Image (cartoon, grey):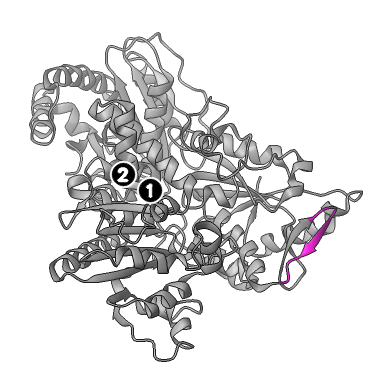
Amino acid sequence: MKSYLAASVPDFLTQPTEEIVGRLAIRVGSEHSGNESQQIRAWRVQIDLLKEALRNAESDRWGILLELPLLRLGRRIDTIILINDVVVCVEFKIGAANFTGADVDQAVDYALCLRDFHAASHGKRIIPVLCSDQARRTQPPESIDFIDDVSPCIRTNGEGLPQVLQAIAGLSGDDQINWQAYDAATYSPTPDIVTAARSLYSGHSVKEIGRADATAEALERTANRLKEIAEEARRDQKKVVCFVTGEPGSGKTLLGLDLVFSGTAGLVAEEPAALLSGNRPLVFVLQAAIAEDARQREGIKADEAKRRAQQALQTLLGYLKDHSDADAHPPENVIVFDEAQRAWDADTGLKLLGRAKSEPELFMEIMGRLPWACLVCLVGSGQEINRGEGGLALWGEALAKSEGWSAHISDRALAERAGLLGFFDIASGADISLVNDPDLHLNSNLRAYRNNLHGAWVAALLNGEIEQAREISRDMEHPPALITRNLSAMKAWLQARRRGDQRVGLLASSGATRLVAEGIPPSPRSDDLGTVTHWFLKPAGDFRSSNALETPLSEFVCQGLEIDYAGLCWGNDLTWNGAEWVPRKMRAPNWQLLKKDDARQYRINTYRVLLTRGRAGTVVYVPHGDENDRTRAPKEFDGIYDVLKRAGCQLLS
């Protein structure tokens, strides 16, 4: 059993309370430490309340599960009652005389986790119930509405629990969920990147916080392979660079964090390791998240927690500046370079550091001073969004110029148009040691856990392959995105999904400058790190939080990060002419076509980033425009709206 106890309701009613409590105590004692006597007292009250509530159950087919573990939250669901085809998720607060907002959020979080990650809950209606046994009596709801299969939380005291279960039975269908199969079903959580960083930093591994399916096996296989390569580099005193590739949301940053944090908190191959990123918002958000978690968990001072976080997560430019001198030897033999496709070229190196070398060249020069080194490059294809970002080809060029380095890369990455092979085809006589490592490419999408084909759909859409995108959408269990012309309707849809711990937010392209006329303010800049950190970490109710739906984030400040439900405000910096996407930039007072190939691709990649930030769903708002404003022509917005519908987006109802 995965739960501590599972049974049919008739069998549960015949078992003595003390016998049930004993079974629960044995299980919890073998797995956890804590105040067991207090837990046992609470169980006695809880079991008696359940027996009283179920004594007149309308069917002997109902099932009950006690203490079902949810590893993603590090908690256990108190009780699950399977009432015909409905899953009732009950959270007990024994001795509580009121219903707190935190307790309601906890009950709803449990229900959402079941919906998203528990195989037997898939497609079932789920009702969270909060039972504060000493609270005032409340009336059971006359009707129950569901949003994406999960209802609002029902509040009740112990005395009212029977009436609540009777009301739920009245709306249930004739089918009965099998309690044995439900208990045996897989639970495959996919943590968001902030949660993952906290868990990995506290000593968990990618296996412990990840899923329990083929996707997780592949992720763990890649994680283990990276550790093997690092250990081999140390043992043989050699220098290696590994390229981990995959679509947006496939788990690359999760792997990097695992390599740096897991085991003894950053000691891979018994040596220090660090994750570096040129994405300053990502670094600062993760630093703030793990520092606050470490402060609360370990009881250390905030300054010490922040210092530890900054040791493990650093900015790329800061690292390069710290080790620019020829005699500066870095302390870390293992470095993870996040978003390595965004590495800048020699012209940018001259501008930033006064050295006409690309970022890959500088890294190999610095790490080449060490007796051994393992450089892990996390590469997301199609995510270059800024001038000077050269993609994998820059790494091929740097490898050709550097001595003593070998490269591990999958044949899938080598075959890509802009991959390393693209460089080798034109670089004659390059003597580079290549190791084909198939485990270094990730095929699955972890971020869009409700739509595994989402990445393929985004790629087809932005490649202008609209009919292919439509065909992909037909194979998706949920629509790739919803679409609306009403900003208020989009915000209302998002607010309805801001439940429990789930986060919603607005996104917009940095080039969509005319959205301000639609009442959408510009995004904070990428150097406004405090504002961006608040956007991702502050709770609902704080106007600085993403949940307030006041300020959108651009591609520059959301890349690498994620939210549960995203509202993308589509600007007319990327329009559709009937045959292909037309990237533009604002050159006031008019729009100007982007003619250079790299600039055009950066604008398209902007929308690739924005379309892949939502973990559970995305809704796209396309304005109507204004006939009296030549920078907001209605015909252009109509073209965007029509092509998104044709590609498989469904109308927001």
Q: Quadrant of residue 433?
A: bottom left
Q: Are marks 1 and 2 in contact (CB under 8 Å)?
A: yes
Where 61 sits versus 377, above or below?
A: above
Few, some or many residues within 10 Å of mark 1 (<14, 14–19, 20+):
many
Q: Is 420 situated left or right of 596 in this image?
A: left
Q: On the image, numbered disc 1 is attached to which residue?
A: 314
Looking at the image, residue 527 sits to the left or right of residue 27; the answer is right
Label 1 SS: strand
Magenta span contains residue 593? yes
The answer to which quarter of the image holds residue 242 is: bottom left
Q: In the current view of this chain or complex, which residue is farthest to the bottom?
A: 429
Camera sees residue 83: no
Does residue 256 belong to the magenta stretch?
A: no
Closer to the camera in the image, 439 or 84: 439
Instruction: Please name the residue shown 29% across and 67% down the image.
Output: 368
In depth, the one of 610 and 469 nearer the eye is 610
Image quadrant holding the N terminus, namely: top left
Which residue in the protein does label 2 denote? 311
Task: Name the element at disc 2.
Answer: helix
Residue 404: % across, % down: 27, 77
Question: Magenta residues, as a range?
Answer: 587-595
In this rendering, the answer to whether 171 lies above or below 644 is above
Q: Is residue 535 above or below residue 587?
A: above
Along the viewing direction, whichever of 23 and 318 lies nearer the viewer = 318
Res. 454 mark: none
Q: Residue at x 39, y 67 (%)?
A: 245
Q: Amino acid at mark 2?
A: Gln
Relative image position of residue 464 (x, y in whole percent): 65, 71
Above or below — where is 533 with respect to 392? above
Q: Specify the amino acid type for callout 1.
A: Gln
Residue 626 as seen in the image, left or right of residue 439? right
Quadrant housing residue 580: bottom right
